[in-house]
């Protein structure tokens, strides 16, 4: 009886130690995976893409070329999704929840006015998206990166009129 109890305590102790070791290993692997994801994605290049899509979105939207504006909104969404997958952290601010809460709802609203071919709504919601870009820059310590409405298309070799 005494021996059985002793074996049981040893076994329980071993299980607890094993559990701790496995948890520590999983935590270590999660950190390794998160670091790998971080280093792979070039945020400034993704942001530069957003800047290009925003430029083209403005000229397609103001030309009331709704299918083209819709195309650029999808590109903005895809770029934002790739950024969220990268799980980046800047100045101790995780970017994924910021993109999700500050940017994606504004993009969805812009999509709704584009789908409704609402020219006035387009300008209003386009400006809201610019504000969202700038708010996130301010939030992450990059307040000196300020977006605004473009004056002329960055590319002269594309027609934006329908
Ligand atoms: C999650 C927060 C966040 C959101 C939302 C965000 N940005 Fe950024 N942006 C950053 C950070 C952080 C940097 C600095 C990147 C670096 O350090 O490499 C940056 C950098 C930039 C740059 C500088 C790179 C360059 O090519 O000059 C531009 C431009 C830019 N963002 C445009 C935009 C636009 C346009 C939007 C909105 C459609 C946007 N950003 C939305 C966080 C954000």
Image (spheres, rainbow, N blue to C red):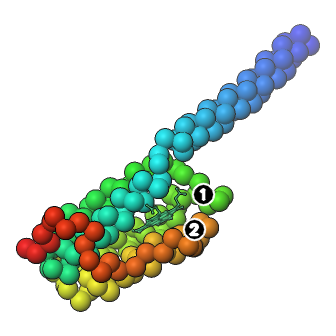
Q: Splitting the image into 4 quarters, where does residue 16 fall?
A: top right
**Which image quarter is the C terminus in?**
bottom left
Residue indicated by mark 1: 90
Q: Quadrant of the N terminus?
A: top right
Q: Residue furthest front?
A: 156
Please say whether residue 117 is visible from this viewpoint. yes
Q: Position of residue 8 (x, y in %)?
A: 81, 18
> Which residue shows up at 10% across the image and 75% down it?
161
- Towards the viewer: 37 or 161: 161
Element under disc 1: strand
C-alpha distance separating marks 2 and 1: 9 Å
Indicate if the residue with disc 2 has its beta carbon within 8 Å of ligand 1.
yes
Name the N-terminal-most of marks 2 and 1. 1
**Residue under circle 2?**
142
Eye-nearest disc, 2 or 1: 2
Classify 10 Å Cα crowding around label 1: few (below 14), some (14-19), many (20 and above): few
Residue 54's x, y, as percent? 32, 69
Q: Could you say whether the residue bearing mark 2 is in a helix, strand or loop? A: loop
């Amino acid at each position: 009886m005494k021996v059985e109890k002793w074996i049981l305590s040893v076994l329980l102790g071993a299980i607890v130690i094993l559990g701790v070791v496995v948890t520590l290993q999983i935590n270590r692997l999660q950190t390794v995976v998160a670091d790998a994801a971080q280093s792979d994605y070039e945020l400034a290049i993704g942001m530069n893409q957003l800047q290009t899509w925003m430029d083209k979105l403005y000229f397609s939207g103001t030309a009331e070329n709704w299918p083209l504006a819709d195309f650029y909104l999808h590109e903005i969404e895809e770029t934002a999704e790739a950024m969220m997958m990268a799980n980046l952290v800047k100045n101790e601010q995780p970017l994924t929840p910021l993109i999700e809460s500050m940017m994606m709802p504004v993009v969805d609203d812009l999509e709704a006015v584009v789908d409704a071919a609402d020219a006035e709504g387009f300008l209003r919601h386009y400006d809201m998206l610019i504000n969202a870009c700038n708010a996130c820059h301010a939030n992450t310590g990059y307040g000196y990166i300020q977006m605004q409405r473009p004056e002329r298309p960055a590319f002269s070799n594309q027609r934006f009129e329908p």
